Amino acid sequence: MYRFLLLSLLILTACTEQMTTTPVTPTLPPTRAPTSTPVTAQSEPIITAYYPDLPRGRTPEGYHYLGNPDAPVTIMVYSDFLCTTCAIYTIDLEPQVIEAFVATGKARLVYRHLLQLGERSQLLAEASECAADHGKFWEMRHELYARYNQLYFNTRETTIDLAQGLGIPADAFSACLDAHTYRAQVEADYGAATAEGVFARPVFRIGNETLVGIPRFEALSQVIERAAQR
């Protein structure tokens, strides 16, 4: 009997040892900081003239316009240079709008700065205004949107590369950026847009109608045509 109990105790001990587990701390892959591969502006062709035959200037409020200043319809575009949907509109849809309505004198395009995505949005808006000193606002605007996904890294350097590609002296452009020559102006534009109830991007104000997001060309055309009839 004693031998039987001893044997049972040994078997139970062995089973207990086999069932005992040692906590294992999982080995996780090391956390990597976001990295980027700098892309220079010259890696893609630069459009050095954006509809050069169309009139351009500033409204009495100081906003940039493209097209006949006396056109019966104004297409007010509120946009942020780091906004993906804003870039899609500018590159894919806006040329259709310009060809159909701005180039024909039916409407003019007015651009409004939004600074909804932080300090980089501010810097890019200022960069577009520095380019305007050299008659290249619309060209810089187009190039910034064409490369919006590159602008989260090396923002300042990319704008300087673009300025040089547009024929703007690098020293003058850099000095304008570093002095924040247009900071107050773009902040005032953004403040005015916010006061007008603009909290999304992009936003289009045409007559008494407002569109938010990327509209279909047909829908945008209908709004413009209705505004022209009023």
Image: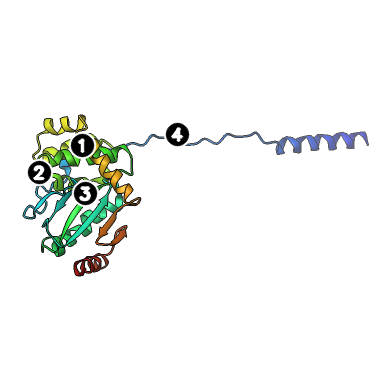
Q: Amino acid at mark 3?
A: Ala
Crowd class of label 3 (few under 14; some 14 to 19; many from 20; radius 10 Å): some
CA separation in Å, label 1 and label 4: 43 Å
Crowd class of label 2 (few under 14; some 14 to 19; many from 20; radius 10 Å): some
CA separation in Å, label 2 and label 4: 49 Å
Write down the residue under mark 3: 146
User: 159 or 52: nearer the eye?
Assistant: 52
Which of marks 4 and 3 precedes in the sequence? Answer: 4
Disc 3 versus disc 2: nearer the observer: 2
Q: Amino acid at mark 4?
A: Pro
Residue 70 percent coordinates (x, y): 12, 58
Which of marks 4 and 1 precedes in the sequence? Answer: 4
Disc 3 versus disc 4: nearer the observer: 3
Write down the residue under mark 1: 182
Q: Is residue 225 above or below residue 53?
A: below
CA separation in Å, label 3 and label 1: 22 Å
**Residue drawn 25% across and 35% down?**
154
CA separation in Å, label 1 and label 2: 15 Å
**Residue drawn 15% across and 65% down?**
100
Q: Which quadrant does the N terminus fall into? A: top right
Crowd class of label 1 (few under 14; some 14 to 19; many from 20; radius 10 Å): some
CA separation in Å, label 3 and label 4: 34 Å
Write down the residue under mark 2: 135
Q: Image quarter for residue 219? A: bottom left
Q: Amino acid at mark 1?
A: Tyr
Q: Secondary structure at mark 3?
A: helix
Q: Which quadrant does the C terminus fall into? A: bottom left
**Which mark, residue 30?**
4
User: 10 or 122: nearer the eye?
Assistant: 122
Q: Is residue 4 above or below residue 194?
A: above
